[in-house]
Structure formats: C-alpha cells, structure tokens
C-alpha cells in the first residue's frame, strides 16, 4: 500500500478548513466531480468529504441530478459499501460525506502487485456481489462499477460512488462520446444505448473480476469506440483466466442480460469454490496479503480555541463623562438612522446576491435621493411640499416585464428517426420537431429548418438566457451545427423565430459512424419561451 504521506496530503492554501461543520484533516485526492478530504464525525469516525467543483455547483442541471442521486444513495445500507452518511445538495458548494475506507482501490492494488490470486478474486466477487444486492435493493443501478470504484479494506472490498456517477457524468468518454460508464467495463446494452438494469452491473462485476485476475481489462485497451465495438460484437476470451474462474465469469458476461447470474447466485458460487475457507472466515488473511499493513488514519483536527489575553500593566480606561440629555438624544437618533440605512443596504445586497442575473433583464429605475439635500440658503422651489399643500403622486416608471421562466427537460433524445420540439411535445417519434440529427457517411450534425444554433465555448461559462441570446444572434449562428467538435458536457444554444430560446447540454453522444452501432445523443434541455 502507498505510504501514509502519499495518501494523506496536507491541506493547501486554496482548500477550506471546514465543510458544513466537518473539520478537514487532509486532502485525499481530486476527481471529475471535485476534491476529496479526510474528516471525522463528532464521534471520531473517519469520513471522506467530497466537495463539488465550482463550475458544476453553478449548473442547475447538475444540482438536480446530484440531489436526486444523493437521496437514492441514502437508502443503501450494506456491509460491503462505503455508506453515504451526510450530504447537502443545496450547499454552496454541494458536498457529501461517506464512510472512509483506509485502503487502496482495486486498480491501485493490481498496478502495485499484479494480478490477484484466485482466492482473492473469489472473495472480491462475493463481497462486491453482496454490495450489489444492497444497492439494487434500494432501487439503484450503479452504472459505473469498475476497479477504481472498489476499495480494498483490511477485511474485504467496499463499493463506492453508487448512484453518484450519474450525477457527476465524470466517466463519459469525451473524445468520441459514449454511454454512461467507463468503456472497458460497460455491458453490451450500455454500449449500444439499450436499457440499463441490475444485470448491467453484473456484467461490470465480471469484467472487474477478470481485471483482478488478469491485471488488465478483459476486452483490451485502445480507443473507446474500439473497445465498445468488441464488447457489443465479440464474445470474451476467457481462455487466459484461471480455470476455476471461467464458468462463473462466463455467466456474468453473458451477452443476454436474462442469462446472467444474479448477485445472490454469485455469492453462493463463490462460497462453493472457496470451500471450507468460506466458513472458516479466511477472507481477512487474504486481504492482508493483498493490501499490506493497514494505514494509520490521522486523528481528528483539534477544535480551534480563542484565547484573549491582555498585556501586562493593562488598566481599564476611565469611564467616559456623562453626556447631556440633548446630546444623548441626538446620538441615539443618528445611531438609529445609521442602523436603518445599514439594514436597508443589507437587504439590498441580499437581493442582489440571490438574483439570477443570467435569467434577468436590465431594469431602469429612477434614481432617488437617499437623504434630503443639504441646505443652500435658497427657498424651496415649486416641487417642494409646503405644509398644508396636497401632495401629488410622483411619476413612476412602468413595471418591467418579468423574464421568461426556464422550463427544464431532464432528458431529451435524438437519433436519425426522431426529433426535438421546443414546444410540447418535446420528444417526438418523427422528424417534425425543430431539431433533428442528420448524418451522412462521415459525420453527424444538428439541423433545423427554422431555429439557429450557437455553440457555447468553455470560456463563456455555463451559459444562460442572456448568453444564448448573444450566441444565437451572432453572425456565426447557423441552421446546422456539426457535432464533430462536441462531446459530453458541450452546451448548445437554440433560438426559434417565435422567440423561444433553448440551451442543450449534451449528456451522452454516440456519433461514431461505425456499422452496427447506432448514432444518437441525449441531452438535458432548458427552454425559455417567449410570452
């Protein structure tokens, strides 16, 4: 195992000291979703705090997915999972806390020591299969089970990131697009955009076990689409695997999801193959051999204490002389006016802070004097109100029209037979919608007879109504948009002549122009409809 100094990195200058009351001890790493830190519960139990990256935190679509997946993950309780124990999807930034597992991932262990022995692979499969029982029992499909999502503790494996991978979209192949998951560990139905069920996780378990036994992915490496093509069209070569593992892995890797073993059947098969060691509890000895000595987890961070000391020789200042009553009243009046002004400015700042400037329009309001003008010695003009003079109503500017309401559509899909409309029904089974996917022998593009497209580049931020107005009104806006330069996460603005504006965020892109693989994309869409 890596040394303690390699695993537990000191906090850096840009790292927070606390997250929602959790005092951070060390940095554990960083990934596609954000940074991971070591902390402890109030009772001293180690936890891993994952803090979402700022650019993801500002994305409303990500927050929706993150909140949904966190709520699902809360239901998972299992001996072989790193349970989610706390989270705040609406935090700034969002974060979550899982039980900390002091051990390497399976990918790290294999990289360090090479393929695992057969008993360790069997204990691995049994533990991960039990974890899948707990995950599937909560109504969750992991979707991204792989060696880096299996941690090896001293007493067995722990499955992590169940349900969270769908929110983060961190493992999508961005070079050529792809379905949710990591290509080398996808099931055939995942690779071809079919229905993803619990059986897909069993296929991934078979591939993960094969990696542990071989020291490399079963379907090889190389470009993502080449790997996916082999998964969809080729039977796995099990001849390189140790003979005792072949029958069980063959059942896990069946092309037909209905023919795959269930997690319960996998556990039973592993117990039979382990024989008396299964009943004698031989797993910990196997894991100690694989993982090496257990790391010493750093102690919780000490609570800060504020100690205020006075210098030697310090004496209390003499009390201020009593003010005359009139001055006291003036002082109180000034203090009251000042406090009121601060309160008003504080409320104004809070409103500005919480306003969604992306979806707002610039509003012109008449300037008003915050206080009476200083006396200049001149008599009041005709606009001043004299005592006994009836007050006239000041002119008011017309109320600004409210900005269009953003209507979210969490999932829209395009292929060469369907289309998308900006007005309901959005998902259409024909080609009558505003947006189509058109492909030729070499490439695919988005096309529309009426709407114009504008691609949002990363330096323009996450985009919104105002930015999409600019991009779709620019000279570069066209009725077609080639998809060669896009990937998962790309943002595309669409404007219809009616005034409707939409923002498409590509979630999955499978546009590869290979025979036998379909061309399609899925996206999240937000529509601002013209009133």
Image: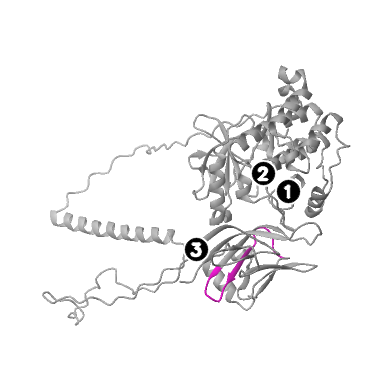
Q: Earlier in the sequence, mark 3 or mark 2?
A: 2
Q: Secondary structure at mark 1?
A: helix
Tell me the chief SS of the magenta region. Answer: loop
Q: Are marks 2 and 1 in contact (CB under 8 Å)?
A: yes
Label 3 – label 2 distance at C-alpha: 32 Å
* 490 drawn magenta: yes
- Marks 3, 1: nearer the viewer: 1
Q: Quadrant of residue 372?
A: bottom left
State whether residue 58 appears in this view.
no
Q: Residue at x 77, y 28 (%)?
A: 120
Q: Position of residue 230 (x, y in %)?
A: 82, 49
Q: Nearer the viewer, residue 287 or 219?
A: 219
Q: Secondary structure at mark 2?
A: loop
* 88 drawn magenta: no
Region in magenta = 485-501
Q: Earlier in the sequence, mark 3 or mark 1?
A: 1
Side (left or right) of 259 relative to 346? right
Q: Secondary structure at mark 3?
A: strand
- The residue where tag 1 is placed is 189
Q: Are marks 3 and 2 in contact (CB under 8 Å)?
A: no
- The residue where tag 2 is placed is 197
Compared with 175, 103 (above or below) is above
Side (left or right) of 425 relative to 286? left
Q: Which label belongs to residue 406?
A: 3
Q: Earlier in the sequence, mark 2 or mark 1?
A: 1
Q: Nearer the viewer, residue 318 or 264?
A: 264
């Amino acid at each position: 195992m890596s040394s303690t100094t390699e695993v537990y990195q000191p906090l850096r200058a840009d790292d927070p000291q606390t997250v929602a009351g959790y005092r951070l001890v060390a940095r554990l790493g960083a990934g596609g979703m954000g940074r991971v830190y070591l902390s402890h519960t109030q009772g001293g139990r180690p936890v891993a705090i994952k803090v979402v990256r700022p650019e993801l935190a500002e994305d409303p679509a990500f927050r929706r997915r993150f909140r949904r997946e966190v709520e699902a993950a809360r239901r998972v309780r299992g001996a072989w999972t790193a349970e989610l124990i706390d989270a705040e999807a609406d935090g700034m930034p969002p974060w979550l806390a899982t039980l900390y597992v002091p051990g390497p991932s399976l990918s790290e262990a294999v990289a360090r020591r090479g393929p695992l022995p057969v008993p360790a692979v069997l204990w691995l499969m049994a533990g991960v299969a039990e974890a899948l029982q707990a995950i599937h029992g909560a109504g969750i499909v992991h979707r991204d089970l792989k060696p880096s999502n299996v941690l090896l503790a001293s007493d067995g494996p722990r499955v992590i990131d169940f349900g969270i991978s769908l929110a983060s979209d961190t493992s999508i192949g961005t070079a050529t697009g792809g379905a949710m998951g990591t290509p080398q560990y996808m099931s055939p139905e995942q690779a071809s955009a079919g229905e993803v069920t619990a059986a897909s996780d069993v296929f991934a378990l078979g591939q993960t076990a094969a990696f542990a036994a071989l020291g490399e992915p079963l379907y090889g490496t190389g470009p993502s689409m080449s790997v996916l093509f082999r998964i969809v069209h080729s039977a796995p070569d099990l001849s390189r695997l140790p003979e005792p593992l072949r029958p069980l892995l063959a059942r896990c890797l069946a092309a037909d999801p209905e023919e795959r073993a269930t997690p319960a059947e996998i556990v039973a098969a592993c117990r039979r193959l382990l024989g008396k060691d299964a009943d004698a509890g031989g797993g910990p000895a196997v894991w100690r051999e694989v993982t090496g000595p257990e790391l010493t987890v750093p102690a919780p961070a000490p609570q800060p204490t504020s100690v205020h000391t006075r210098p030697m020789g310090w004496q209390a200042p003499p009390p201020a002389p009593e003010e005359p009553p009139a001055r006291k009243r003036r002082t109180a009046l000034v203090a009251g006016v000042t406090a009121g002004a601060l309160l008003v400015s504080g409320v104004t700042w809070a409103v500005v802070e919480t306003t969604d400037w992306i979806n707002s329009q610039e509003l012109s309001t008449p300037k008003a004097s915050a206080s009476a003008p200083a006396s200049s010695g001149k008599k009041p003009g005709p606009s001043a109100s004299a005592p006994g003079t009836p007050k006239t109503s000041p002119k008011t500017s017309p109320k600004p029209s409210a900005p269009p309401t953003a209507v979210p559509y969490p999932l829209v899909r395009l292929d060469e037979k369907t289309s998308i409309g900006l007005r309901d029904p959005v998902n259409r089974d024909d080609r009558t919608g505003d947006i189509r996917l058109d492909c030729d022998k070499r490439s695919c593009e988005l096309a529309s007879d009426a709407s114009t497209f504008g691609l949002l580049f990363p330096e323009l931020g996450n985009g919104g109504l105002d930015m999409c107005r600019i991009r779709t009104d620019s000279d570069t806006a066209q009725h077609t948009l080639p998809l060669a330069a896009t990937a998962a996460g790309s943002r595309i603005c669409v404007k219809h002549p009616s005034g409707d504006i939409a923002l498409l965020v590509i979630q999955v892109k499978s546009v590869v122009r290979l025979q036998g693989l379909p061309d399609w994309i899925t996206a999240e869409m937000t529509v601002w409809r013209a009133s």
